[in-house]
């Protein structure tokens, strides 16, 4: 896999810890539906069109969350509405394998992770990175009622160039007011050479032929660091307003790549969902 790293306590997808704070009562669903909770909505996001791009784009994404026992289906941050150990980025079909109170281990499958050249001027002449099936394993440790540390490793199962990525996060959660929660997040992300070259490399065979960019081989290592926040506000027993903000800095060869025009960037999102 070409990636060897140790999870760090500083690094995203928004989730409440397994043990809630004393003044916070997690959403439990409608009486008679214990163990089964779902959420459905939509969110609007704005951010860089690809990591390192100086162009921005706005799009609408579905927010879906479904929890049944230890299994969860999530996309668009829907897992954050189920009071499960899912970050906004941790979409897909997930299963909790180990739950020892403060220490949890989960695994998931998700479809995504590609990049289309589209009408991006800087990417013209480079190949698309096809979307793929990714397997993720995540280890979460709740330091206390507010602090949590987590490390997740995801791998491209179909060999489509997405490679392996290691995400490490630290999260601090607090209640601003009854029904309003805020999470502060810091992250460190690493990737193997396959991922780095697919998204930041310029093949020698294409340099000067299909693209004017110089050849560039991106090495494994640091991908990016980030800080941000996630919040949600209960408008009603069932309706939830949610949002997020991230400030990301590309690092290492991701920052040095000729594809990177703006290494420091931010993204914002806001959405509305109904949960039951």
Image: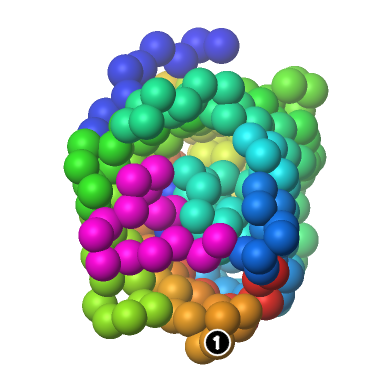
**Image position, residue 108 (x, y; %):** 65, 32
Residue at position x 62%, y 79% in the image: 238
* 81 and 11: which is toward the camera: 81
* 44 and 120: which is toward the camera: 44
Q: How is the image coloured?
A: rainbow
Q: Which residues are magenta?
A: 15-28
Visible residue check, residue 120: no
**Quadrant housing the N terminus:** top right
Residue at position x 71%, y 33% in the image: 109
| In this picture, residue 166 sits left or right of residue 59 | left
Quarter of the rendering containing residue 227 = bottom left
Residue at position x 34%, y 46% in the image: 19
* 89 and 73: which is toward the camera: 73
What SS does tag 1 mark? loop
**Image position, residue 267 (x, y; %):** 45, 69
**Quadrant housing the C terminus:** bottom right
**Image position, residue 223 (x, y; %):** 39, 37
| In this picture, residue 89 sits left or right of residue 225 | right
* 243 and 158: which is toward the camera: 243
**Image position, residue 219 (x, y; %):** 43, 23
Q: State whether residue 195 is above or below residue 57.
A: above
Residue at position x 56%, y 61% in the image: 28
Which residue in the structure is indicated by mark 1?
236
């Amino acid at each position: 896999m070409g990636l060897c790293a140790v999870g760090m306590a500083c690094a995203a997808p928004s989730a409440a810890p397994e043990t809630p704070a004393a003044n916070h009562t997690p959403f439990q669903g409608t009486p008679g539906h214990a163990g089964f909770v779902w959420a459905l909505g939509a969110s609007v996001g704005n951010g860089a069109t690809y990591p390192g791009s100086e162009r921005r784009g706005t799009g609408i994404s579905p927010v879906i969350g479904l929890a049944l026992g230890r299994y969860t289906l999530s996309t668009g941050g829907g897992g954050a509405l189920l009071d499960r150990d899912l970050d906004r980025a941790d979409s897909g079909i997930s299963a909790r394998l180990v739950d020892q109170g403060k220490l949890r281990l989960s695994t998931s499958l998700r479809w995504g992770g590609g990049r289309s050249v589209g009408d991006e001027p800087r990417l013209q002449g480079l190949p698309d990175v096809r979307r793929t099936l990714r397997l993720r394993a995540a280890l979460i440790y709740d330091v206390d009622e507010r602090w949590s540390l987590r490390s997740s490793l995801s791998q491209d199962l179909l060999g489509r160039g997405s490679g392996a990525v290691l995400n490490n996060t630290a999260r601090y959660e607090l209640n601003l007011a009854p029904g309003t929660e805020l999470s502060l997040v810091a992250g460190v992300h690493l990737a193997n050479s396959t991922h780095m070259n697919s998204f930041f490399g310029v093949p020698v065979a294409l340099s000067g032929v299909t693209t004017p960019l110089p050849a560039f081989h991106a090495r494994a290592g640091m991908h990016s660091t980030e800080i941000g926040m996630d919040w949600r506000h209960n408008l009603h027993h069932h309706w939830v307003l949610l949002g997020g903000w991230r400030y990301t800095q590309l690092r290492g060869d991701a920052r040095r790549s000729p594809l990177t025009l703006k290494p420091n960037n931010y993204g914002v999102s806001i959405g509305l969902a109904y949960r039951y």
